[in-house]
Image (cartoon, rainbow, N blue to C red):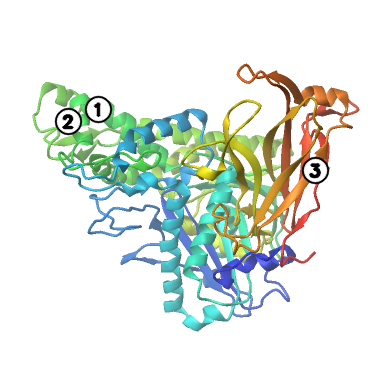
């Protein structure tokens, strides 16, 4: 089989040697010149750290953070994107309020809960009418975001980010150096992040790099994944010790510390034990990383969808949502797109949220704050408005209001810390310090609330310092270097697409007319040679455990016929395998023959069912099977199984009864 084609060897070729990675860090023999670029894609902001090692052991001060984003001197860039035609930017800063601004997309990458999925389908159906491209009188704009998936949006956004990063590196260094040295990529992700979200993030980052670096031909580098909490912990502690931060210097061998990475969408925690102070500082992770969606966006959602609606009242709230008037303004379907009025209010609330400090030490509430309302709202000075705190076009926000909006986040973060403390207690260890880092940690009210918990437990709470906002991006570079820590094992993209040939119910939108046929047993119209693609080229293959994919199959067998058959697997390295072309020389079929003659009777009774079709009057058996594809970094193992088996202890094994396994499919370019 031909190997997968690569566009941009500096990135795609990384998969060729990733399975051989034995790097342990920037120690003796591990300091060959190379680029390390860490992408910290966040819910609200994105940061990128990088370094060129230049053949020597680097220091913390050598790690660079992209500081200039489209004219704005900031350490991070907003994780927002638009497909609208407008006078501002289409990503990051200065998009403007006239555009459909898509935000918080990162939170859409995880597998949605059932209720959320149903709500997304409802919203999509409501917006589907806007996709009619026929002229219908006056139309302001076709909302392009409605036909984009979440991973499409993340990829398009990150392509702009990486393109900017390349420009900044070339402005800082000799541009020719990108042609000379390997490029390692470190991708950070939340501690509690499902496999789907990791895979989609991985695909988006790699697609962006391939697009931007496609003209560069260099030695292959490595691709690594790291949790945001571990990256944050590495940089926070090393920086605290380097700066001589009081508290960090007092840590002793055998004591533990907890790092809390409080970001815009998620809050992640991890705990470490001090193993050695000199001559080399060594720590060991002692608890599983944990986290939850208790970041600053939860406060934003509370403000937009609970506080504003309750305080403004139905009339004013409806005016806020319909500020565009005659110009069309549509929703986000399954994306987070705010109405113009919501965008304006959120921007104004951001200042109040960032500066909120809570009560004074003696428990007195701070002074009330005010939000300017749009001109069409709160100008009538009615008794109802005054009772709601609306006067002269301004909305009063009290200390109690802010505490209410912060409460869920504060309680959630405290709960996560308490869980870490219990896990440490179970190991008979002692916590001395908590490091609070991440962008959300800059909030004085949050710090004060966590400080109260720290004092009650008699340990010290330390802030992440001036670098707390960029600790994850810098820590990701540290992990990529192995500077004072262990390098994460490399991961690779899958080089092939894997699909299974099945007879699927015929649909005009999915099949060619010549595929249609009528099943003689149940009289249902089906499609010949339909391929159900279950693994895509470029999917993430982890280093620590196989990636498992399962396809459930149902085969119909006549009682008088043979109980043997074949399942066909399609393997292809094409970028668009569903559009089969004779020029796709990588495509091949793998036939997996099975015979049920020797199947144990108890297993056969589990998976076979006799059916008499009421329409055709024909009797046949349906057999339930599943095809299992197990992907490791150098091969794919294929097995056809059915039913459940019982072990010697009487426990049911979901592995089932093995009907047949195929020869493993070896991946090209991997040392075996």
Left or right of 35 on screen, residue 646: right
Farthest top residue in view:
614
Residue nearest the observer in this picture, 487 or 622: 622
Residue 361, quarter of the rendered image: top left
Which residue is located at x 72 percent, y 40 percent? 627
User: Mark 2 — residue?
Assistant: 390
Query: Label 1 crowding class (10 Å Cα cut-off): few <14, some 14-19, many 20+?
Result: some
| First-in-chain label (3 vs 1) | 1
Residue nearest the observer in this picture, 64 or 192: 192
Please tell me whether mark 3 sits on a helix, a strand or a loop: strand
What's the mark number on residue 604?
none
Which residue is located at x 77 percent, y 32 percent? 654
Which residue is located at x 24 percent, y 56 percent? 86
User: Mark 1 — residue?
Assistant: 311
| First-in-chain label (2 vs 1) | 1
Q: Is residue 492 visible?
A: yes
Mark 1 and mark 2 in contact (Cβ < 8 Å)?
yes
**Label 2, label 1: how far apart the Cα atoms are:** 9 Å
């Amino acid at each position: 089989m031909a190997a997968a084609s690569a566009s941009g060897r500096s990135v795609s070729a990384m998969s060729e040697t990733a399975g051989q990675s034995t790097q342990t860090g920037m120690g003796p023999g591990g300091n060959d010149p190379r680029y390390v670029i860490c992408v910290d894609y966040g819910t609200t902001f994105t940061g990128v750290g990088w370094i060129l090692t230049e053949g020597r052991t680097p220091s913390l001060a050598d790690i660079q953070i992209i500081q200039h984003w489209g004219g704005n001197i900031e350490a991070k860039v907003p994780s927002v994107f638009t497909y609208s035609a407008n006078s501002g930017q289409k990503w990051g800063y200065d998009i403007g309020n006239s555009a459909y601004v898509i935000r918080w997309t990162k939170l859409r990458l995880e597998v949605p809960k059932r209720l959320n999925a149903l709500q997304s389908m409802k919203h999509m159906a409501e917006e589907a009418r806007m996709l009619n491209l026929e002229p219908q009188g006056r139309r302001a704009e076709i909302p392009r975001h409605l036909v984009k998936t979440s991973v499409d949006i993340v990829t398009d956004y990150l392509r702009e980010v990486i393109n900017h990063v390349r420009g900044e590196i070339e402005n800082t260094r000799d541009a020719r150096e990108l042609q000379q040295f390997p490029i390692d990529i470190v991708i950070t992700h939340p501690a509690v992040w499902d496999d789907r979200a990791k895979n989609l993030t991985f695909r988006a980052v790699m697609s962006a790099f391939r697009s931007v670096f496609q003209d560069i031909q260099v030695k292959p580098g490595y691709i690594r994944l790291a949790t945001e909490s571990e990256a944050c912990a590495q940089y926070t502690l090393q920086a605290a010790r380097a700066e001589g931060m009081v508290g960090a210097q007092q840590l002793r061998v055998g004591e533990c510390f907890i790092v809390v990475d409080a970001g815009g969408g998620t809050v992640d925690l991890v705990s470490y034990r001090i193993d050695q102070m000199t001559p080399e500082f060594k720590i060991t992770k002692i608890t599983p990383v944990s986290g939850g969606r208790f970041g600053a966006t939860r406060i934003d959602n509370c403000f937009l969808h609970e506080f504003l609606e309750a305080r403004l009242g139905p009339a004013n709230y409806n005016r806020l949502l319909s500020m565009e008037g005659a110009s069309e303004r549509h929703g986000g379907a399954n994306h987070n797109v705010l109405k113009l009025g919501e965008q304006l209010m959120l921007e104004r609330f951001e200042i109040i949220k960032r500066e909120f400090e809570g009560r004074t030490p003696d428990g007195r509430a701070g002074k009330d704050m005010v939000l300017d309302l749009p001109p069409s709202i709160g100008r009538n000075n009615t008794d109802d408005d005054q009772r709601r705190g609306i006067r002269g076009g301004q909305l009063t926000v009290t200390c109690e209001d802010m505490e209410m909006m912060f409460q869920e986040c504060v309680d959630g973060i405290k709960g996560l810390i308490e869980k870490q403390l219990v896990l440490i207690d179970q190991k008979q260890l002692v916590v001395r310090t908590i490091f609070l880092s991440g962008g959300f940690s800059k909030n004085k009210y949050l710090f004060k609330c966590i400080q109260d918990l720290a004092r009650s437990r008699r340990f010290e709470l330390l802030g992440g310092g001036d670098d707390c906002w960029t600790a994850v991006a810098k820590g990701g570079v540290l992990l990529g270097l192995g500077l004072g820590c262990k390098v994460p094992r490399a991961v690779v993209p899958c080089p092939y697409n894997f699909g299974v040939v099945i007879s699927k119910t015929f649909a005009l939108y999915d099949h060619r007319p010549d595929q249609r046929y009528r099943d003689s047993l149940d009289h249902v119209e089906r499609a010949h040679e339909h391929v159900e693609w279950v693994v895509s080229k470029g999917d993430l293959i982890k280093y620590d455990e196989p990636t498992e994919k399962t396809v459930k199959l149902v085969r119909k067998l006549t009682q008088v016929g043979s109980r043997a058959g074949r399942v066909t697997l399609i393997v292809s390295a094409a970028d668009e395998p569903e559009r089969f072309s004779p020029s796709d020389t990588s495509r091949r079929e793998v036939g997996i023959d099975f015979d049920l003659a020797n199947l144990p009777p108890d297993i056969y009774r589990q998976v076979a069912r006799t059916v008499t079709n009421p329409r055709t009057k024909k009797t046949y058996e349906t057999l339930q099977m599943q095809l299992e594809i197990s992907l490791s970094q150098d091969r794919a193992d294929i097995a056809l199984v059915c039913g459940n088996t019982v072990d010697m202890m009487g426990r049911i094994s979901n592995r089932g009864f093995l009907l047949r396994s195929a020869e493993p499919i070896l991946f090209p370019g991997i040392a075996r």
